[in-house]
Structure formats: structure tokens, C-alpha cells
Amino acid sequence: MRDDTQRWIAADKAHCWHPFTPQAHWTNRAHDPLMLARGEGVWLWDSEGRRYLDGNSSIWTNIHGHCHPVLNAAITRQLGEVAHISYLGFGHPLAGELAARLCAFFPPRTLERVFFSDDGSTAIECAMKMAIQYRQQTGEPQRTGFIAFEQAYHGDTMGAASLGGVSRFHDRFRSGGNPVTFVSDLQALENLPESVIALSAAVVIEPLIQGVNEMRPWPKGMLSGLRKWCDAHGIQLILDEVMTGFGRTGKMFACQHEGVIPDFLCVAKGLTGGYLPMAATLVTGQVYDAFLGTDDRAFYYGHSYTANPLGCAVALASLDVFEQERTLANLQPKMVKMSSLLADLKAASPYVHEVRQCGFVAGIELRQPDGRPFPAQQRFGSEICMAAREYELLTRPIRDTLVLMPPLCTTETELGHAVAAIGRALGVG
């Protein structure tokens, strides 16, 4: 191991605190974490010069690949102008252009306004606060509750965490969040008592597929049914497209598969192509209009880096690349190829219990050959991901479900490499 690699690992273990990570394991002397040093296309290289296919798009963010020349050039150009300005009391040219282009993905007079923030959690937080203040300013201040789905994940800030249905992540913070009623599916939602409905401001859902719930798709028609239920009960709909937005499901946004327009649409991760932290909450004109009038009706919420010019520049460049490279059209045959490759993997390995796919997102659930789950302490999914590194693939499991969510620019050959690496890690091929 190179001296600089050893130095970087030592500094990391001595001073850094990693997300969703048992630090005792991370800092164990026997653990040598990868120091990822550069990227190009779908590939990443560590500080030792070894390369890996980025099988989970750097935690579900990267869209067009690493070090993309169009995205790099956009940031470089903007650096020559200004890196950051306050969006409180000022504007800048790129923010309005980006907001207009995001709204243009939806029919006129639907999602008309964009509130920028920093990440997926804050995009959700914005929607929650807007939903509550909207009720206060439209004569329904009693509507302070939310309805969310079991096993959902919507972020880690206190409000967003209260919507989370994964007990391991969120139970210890329940007392500090908003009142939330959890349901399992649309049928359970329809069976809610009127006393709950009358006090609820909005329903929150990850459209088409739940991510942290081991990549579990919703039944077809679930989203359109949810929109109808919300309309019938005067409840607003918040769509968390932090993971599903920007092409992951085969359309620009997951809600477009069922022609659903939410009251709030939250995006982040792929907004900047995976380059910079930036998020947006899109809202309808009806929601926005409720905040007009006297000063006390304004939305008093914001972030120091709201609408950061560098983030806006690279987000606009990412939208350009979608058009220039025909990203969505070129993705369609690759989604079919992914299905075929994963079907072959399931047939070849007794450990692949189920493959769940939505667009270019897949969860590969591993179980024992007799169908029983592996003991949790065995961490079988983690072991397979570690083994896959030896075959040039990086990804992470959710429990014992392996996530395969590569950048949209991944070729069919590279996709084959990724699935073959999983197979070899499982002892196939």
C-alpha cells in the first residue's frame, strides 16, 4: 500500500465520522477502506490505481458518468463569473432559467414554482413546512399531520425523519418530529378513520418504487389511485422523487408513468448530474398563491447556499446532456438488457431469491437456497459486495438485497460486467 494511501486512511479513521456506518467496524485496524481518488464515465479508481464500475451511481446521484466534459465545462465557466451569491434578496441568471426548465416538464398551470435547497432531506422538509403553513393560511390550521408508508425513507432531518417507516433509522427520533400515520398500501389508506383524515395535511410517497425498502416497486396504478384518493379527501400529495427523478425509472420523473401531478415534487441527487449538492421543491400555483399577501404569509425558510450558481450551472448542463445524448431514448434497450442479465443471474445462482426492477434500478435479494433469509449477523449481502470489488464492481446492499443502479450512460457491455461481477462474487461463472 502506498504511503499516501496509508496516511489518508489513518487521518480518516482518526477524525472522520461516516454516514450509516458502525464506526467501530470502520476504525478497526484490520479494515482498510478504499480511498476513491478519481472517476471517468462509469468507472472509479482508488488511490492504489484499481478501477471499479460505479454500480450504485455514488449513492444514487450520478447520471451521465464521472468527469463528463459538458458538466465540467459548465462549472468551469461559472467559476469564471461567480461561485456563490446570496439568494436572499437577490437573484442570478441561472436560477430562473433552471426553475423554468424544471417546470416545463409538466403541463402548464400545474407545477409552476421552484424552491431551491440543498439535499433530498431539505427538499422534503420544505414541502412539509409549506403544507402545514398552507393549511394555516387557508382556514384549516388543524391539519398538521402527515400520512406516510411503512418502510419508507424520506431523509434524516427531523421533519423528514418523522416520515420514515424504517424503525432502525427513525424510531429513536419519533418524539421530535411531526405527527405521522403510517399505512402499508392503498387499501390501508382507504380504511383510515375520518378522524385521521380530517387532521392530515398531506400524503408522502416514493413513486413507483421504495428505495431503502430493498427496492420494492409499487403495484401498477397505485400512484394514480393515490392521487384520486387525495383529491377526494382534500389532502395534498407530496412525491419524493429524490431517487426516482432524472431518468432512473425510464422517464424523466416517475410520476409521468401514470400521468400524476403532485402538489409538491421533491428532487435532489440527480438534479446536478451527481456533481454538487442541490435540491428543489416544485409546487403548484395553488400552493404558491396561498403565501401571497401580507408579510406574515411569506415562507420564512431558507439555506445559505440556496440556488447556488455552480449547482444551477451544472444542473442546466445535465438537462442539456439529456437532450444532446438522447439519454432517455438510449436507456430503453438497456433496461431490457438489465432484465435479461438479472434473469440469467437468478437462474444461475441458488442464492438469488428475487430480482426487483423498476427502470434502471434493481434490487437483487439474496437468501439461502431453501428460501430462508440469512442470519442478520452474517451480513451476507455485505460480504458479496466486498467480494464483488475483486471483480471491479462497487455497490452497497440494503440488508441482503444488492442494489444495482449504475449511471444512465452505462453501456450494455458495462452492464454485463456489473452483473457478471455479482455472479462471480456469488460463485457463478
Image (cartoon, rainbow, N blue to C red):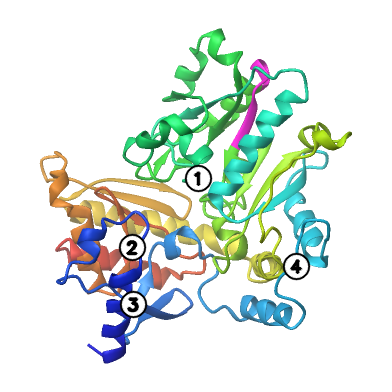
Q: CA distance from mark 1 to mark 3?
A: 28 Å
**Residue lying furthest left in this view?**
370
The image shows residue 225, relative to residue 152, as above or below, that is above
Residue 85 — which label? Answer: 4
Residue 43, horizontal then vertical, whole percent = 41, 76
Q: CA distance from mark 3 to mark 2?
A: 15 Å
Q: Residue at x 51, y 65 (%)?
A: 62
Say what amino acid the circle numbered 4 marks. Ile
Say what amino acid the circle numbered 1 marks. Thr
Left or right side of 342 for 205: right
Residue 157 — which label? Answer: 1
Looking at the image, is mark 2 or mark 1 nearer the viewer? Answer: 1
Q: Residue at x 66, y 61 (%)?
A: 305
Disc 3 element: loop
**Mark 1 Cα-neighbour bin, 10 Å: few <14, some 14–19, many ≥20:** some
Disc 1 element: loop
Identify the image quadrant of the N terminus.
Answer: bottom left
Mark 2 vs 1: CB contact within 8 A: no
Residue 247, horizontal then vertical, whole percent = 57, 56
The image shows residue 213, relative to residue 150, as above or below, that is below
**What residue did someone put label 3 on?**
35
Region in magenta: 231-238
**What residue did someone put label 2 on?**
395
Looking at the image, is mark 4 or mark 2 nearer the viewer? Answer: 4
Mark closest to the chain's N terminus, 3 or 4: 3
Q: CA distance from mark 2 to mark 1?
A: 25 Å
Disc 2 element: loop
